[in-house]
Image (spheres, rainbow, N blue to C red):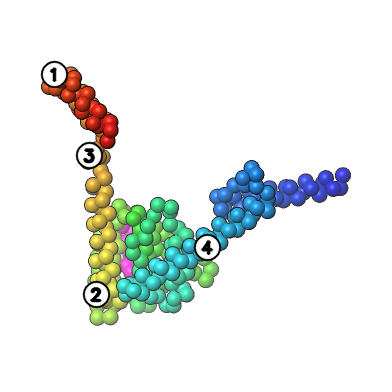
């Protein structure tokens, strides 16, 4: 009896752990998989994800260094900021550029310290890892009204005008121009792509077949011509 209770407690403990691991990893235990094998598979996925996140954060930081898009207070803290962005990325999201600057800049003594920023194919993501807590915010590209910059001798300010708020990011004078130009390039490219994919320009064989059917009904083409066109469209 004591042995049965012990086994039941062990099973309940394993099921509770598996439920927690599933919520963390998104994986579920397979029918032919032991508890130990499932735990090992989850650990392997977490390790791989951690390595990928670390690599992505370092690549975003290196992009900033290579392009003179800011370097932050230290490499270690900057990568921590970018790690938050990397973890926030969706499966179909690609980082197009990254930069570092003083967020909510009002003066040399009034700002929210360094944030990491990344523009993806979907949104602008900004993040700051703090000693106690973190800040992660995103703005859809469609909700960015304008991006402007003003430069002084030593520093420049990039102003983001969005639907909900307006905020400034302070960087070096040379970086302000380069970052703003790159942002404009990306926003223009994304808008152009969206226009090219609009429903009005989408091609549908079914619509074309219907068009030729209407021509057949009014006697503008013969049934033979209609069947030939229909066959061609169905083979596309």
Which residue lies under the disc numbered 2?
151
Q: CA distance from mark 1 to mark 3?
A: 28 Å
For the point 35% across and 78% down, which residue is it? 108
Q: CA distance from mark 2 to mark 3?
A: 42 Å
First reached walking from the N terminus: tag 2 or tag 3: 2
First reached walking from the N terminus: tag 1 or tag 2: 2
- Which residue is situated farthest in the right direction here? 1
Which residue lies under the disc numbered 4?
50
From what the image shows, is residue 217 above or below residue 74? above
| Range of residues picked out in magenta | 162-169
Q: Nearer the viewer, mark 1 or mark 3?
A: 1
First reached walking from the N terminus: tag 3 or tag 4: 4
Q: How many labels sit on residues?
A: 4
- Badge 4 marks a residue whose secondary structure is helix
Q: CA distance from mark 1 to mark 2?
A: 68 Å
- Badge 1 marks a residue whose secondary structure is loop
Which residue lies under the disc numbered 3?
200
Residue 36 place in picture, x, y as percent: 68, 53
First reached walking from the N terminus: tag 4 or tag 2: 4
For the point 24% across and 38% down, which residue is it? 203
- Badge 3 marks a residue whose secondary structure is helix
Q: Nearer the viewer, mark 4 or mark 2?
A: 4
Q: CA distance from mark 4 to mark 2?
A: 39 Å
């Amino acid at each position: 009896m004591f042995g049965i209770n012990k086994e039941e407690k062990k099973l309940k403990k394993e099921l509770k752990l598996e439920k927690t691991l599933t919520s963390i990893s998104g994986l579920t235990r397979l029918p032919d998989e032991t508890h130990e094998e499932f735990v090992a598979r989850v650990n392997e996925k977490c390790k791989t994800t951690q390595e990928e996140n670390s690599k992505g954060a370092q690549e975003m930081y290196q992009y900033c260094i290579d392009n003179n898009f800011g370097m932050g207070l230290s490499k270690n803290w900057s990568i921590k900021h970018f790690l938050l962005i990397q973890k926030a990325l969706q499966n179909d999201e690609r980082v197009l550029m990254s930069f570092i600057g003083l967020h909510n800049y009002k003066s040399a003594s009034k700002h929210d310290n360094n944030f990491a920023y990344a523009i993806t194919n979907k949104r602008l993501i900004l993040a700051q890892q703090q000693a106690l807590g973190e800040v992660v915010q995103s703005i859809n590209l469609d909700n960015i009204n304008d991006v402007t910059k003003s430069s002084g001798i030593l520093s420049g300010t990039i102003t983001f005008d969005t639907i909900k708020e307006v905020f400034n990011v302070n960087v070096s004078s040379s970086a302000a121009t380069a970052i703003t130009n790159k942002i404009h390039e990306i926003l223009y490219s994304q808008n152009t792509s969206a226009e090219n994919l609009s429903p009005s320009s989408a091609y549908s064989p079914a619509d074309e077949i219907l068009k030729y059917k209407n021509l057949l009904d009014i006697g503008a083409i013969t049934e033979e011509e209609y069947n030939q066109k229909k066959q061609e469209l169905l083979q596309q």
